[in-house]
Amino acid sequence: MKQKIFFSIVLLVILGGAYYWNTPDGIKSGEPQVTNTPLPLFTSTEAVEEGAAAVAGSPGDTLNEPLTHKIKNYKVGKGAEYRAELEKNPHQTPDTAVVSALELGEIFDGVKNDTDADQAFQFFANCVNNETVVSLQTSCLRYAKRLSENYSSLRALWPSLEASASDEVRDVLKFDQR
């Protein structure tokens, strides 16, 4: 667990710095960027919560309340906060990155059964498509991939999620697989 967290933090620092220094001025100024990516599986945390409520009624599985609580408390879209912290001190990993990496790891580690896996996969899909920090998107995509490898019910969802990720995020994931 500690190695996963350490690796995630190091990756966040490297990718965050590279993203910040290689970002066009339009993104740094907060102007929205238009991309041609497919629609996300879920577009909001409310959709994830609705999915979790629907899955909660599945026979044989119980809803993992701590996992649901962690998912509800995670706020997607931390780009502005991340960049502000990085501008204040470019030589230190932003606290936002560290806290987010830990929270994402806790969500992944909170998966105990198929119901949790479905709920967490949808959360990570939302994160991949709506998070504004590339290193966090990459972490979410990596966790979703691991869930799809561990739970057969999610394997069919993986290809469309991978295709919906930006080229930059997919490239980082490919680099990790070498």
Image (cartoon, rainbow, N blue to C red):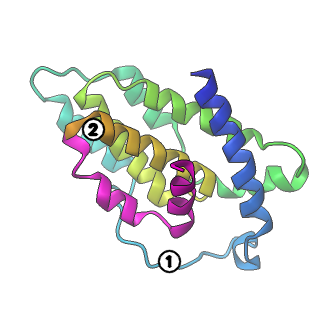
Looking at the rendering, which quadrant does residue 3 occupy? top right
Which residue corresponds to mark 1?
35
Identified by mark 2, the residue type is Asp
- The circle on residue 118 is 2
Q: How many marks?
A: 2
Residue depicted at x 24% and y 46%: 155
In this rendering, would 25 be left or right of 139?
A: right
- Against 24, is 109 above or below? above
Q: SS class of the residue under badge 1? A: loop
Q: SS class of the residue under badge 2? A: helix
Q: Nearer the viewer, residue 32 or 145?
A: 145
Q: At which x and y percent is residue 2?
A: 63, 22
- The circle on residue 13 is none
Which range is magenta? 153-178
Q: Is residue 155 magenta?
A: yes
- Against 48, is 25 above or below? below
Q: At which x and y percent is residue 80?
A: 70, 58
Q: Nearer the viewer, residue 96 or 143?
A: 143
Identified by mark 1, the residue type is Thr
Give the mark nearer the N terminus: 1 vs 2: 1
Q: Quadrant of the N terminus?
A: top right
Q: Which residue in the rendered view is the most extreme toward the left?
A: 59
Q: Nearer the viewer, residue 107 or 10?
A: 10
